Amino acid sequence: MKNNKSNGLVTILITVFAILGTISHVWADGIKMAGSDWPVWQLVVGMKEQGQLSKFNFSYEKYAITIDGFSKEKFDITFMTIYDFIGTQRDNPNGVIIAIQDFSNGGDGIVLRPELASSAATLKGQTIGLPTEAVSLYLMNLYLVKNGLTLNDIKLTNIPGEFVSKAYVANKSLSGIAGWNPNLNEAISAGGNPAATSADFPRNIYDCVVVNKKSLQKNRAVYVQFLKDWFNAVNDPAIVSAAAKKLNIKADDLKSWLGDANIYHDAKASLAEFDRLKTVANEMQAFYSVKPASITGGAADLFGNKTLNIDGLLDDSLLKEIVAEVKN
């Protein structure tokens, strides 16, 4: 009997592995989508839970992984700020923006030690921790320039976005941090002062749907349908609840974080913002053209005199198709 049971178990295991192998093969051939921890992008998790991503092989990643993975064509579609997208495209222009999801309206921020919060001038020569290869650097630049300083006036240390608060608490030599919600909450709870947020610089930090050009050519209809589903999802409370449940966070917390973004609720509103997006993209390209002295390490490679065709990075035709369809 033991031998028969053992043989039966082996047969079952072989069958299971064969099924898993088949599923893996299907996934490998699917359109690869990556999401990450910006609250607006977390809604895609809710879409996945509600069965709305059947055409995609979806994975939930750290934001830095989505940026690197898209540039290396490991992902066909993901979600990025316009700043980070411009950064990925300077060496390998393989993608296009097909929609604007929102602009950060308080969800990105700068937290300083209380003794330094009275004036930005006190930051001169101080050390700030932030993800130097992500949009937090651009927010810090906007804040400093507004207050008569530049990134050359401070010191920077590179900290992944999800760890900025922990670094603030543990490392007293940091005068402040920059990052995005909810990753700043722990630093604020520890007494850090929110010196500025993206609400002080509206329509500068856009969050976008970015797609690999070759994948868009092959799968245009799939991406059009995804955008339709996306705009339905941002208006559906059930999506918020499903995302929160899957991510093991409170639905009310996710709703609160979503309030820190100005979300575009339909294709028409997203389409109307493309002219401003182009202006911001050109401003960011100019920013990337000269490396600040405070930038070291891998982030330094993002800078230099490299000219991009900004028009070639923006494709609003899918939105126009959806808008025209709604009119008819």
Image (cartoon, helix red, strand yellow):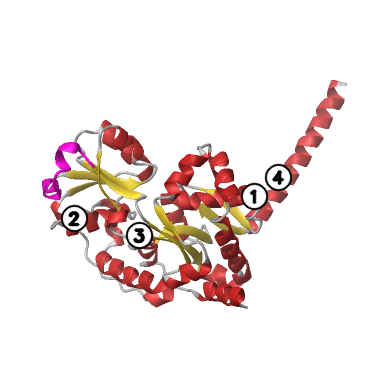
Q: Give whichever of discs 1 and 3 has the lower sequence position.
A: 1
Q: Please, what is the three-letter code of the amino acid marked with disc 4?
A: Leu
Q: Which residue is mark 4?
A: 20
**Helix, strand or loop at disc 4?**
helix
- Nearest the viewer among 240 and 316 is 240
Q: Quadrant of residue 56?
A: bottom right
Q: Label 1 vs label 4: CA separation?
A: 22 Å
Sequence-wise first label, 2 or 1: 1
In front: mark 2 or mark 4? 2
Q: Label 2 belongs to which residue?
A: 144
Kind of residue indicated by mark 1: Gln
Between residue 240 and residue 223, name the one nearer to us.
240
Please rate how many residues cluster around mark 3, counting C-alpha atoms within 10 Å: few if below 14, some from 14 to 19, many from 20: many
Q: Residues within 10 Å of mark 4 (few under 14, many from 20)?
A: few
* Residue receiving disc 3: 205
Q: Position of residue 91 (x, y in %)?
A: 37, 66
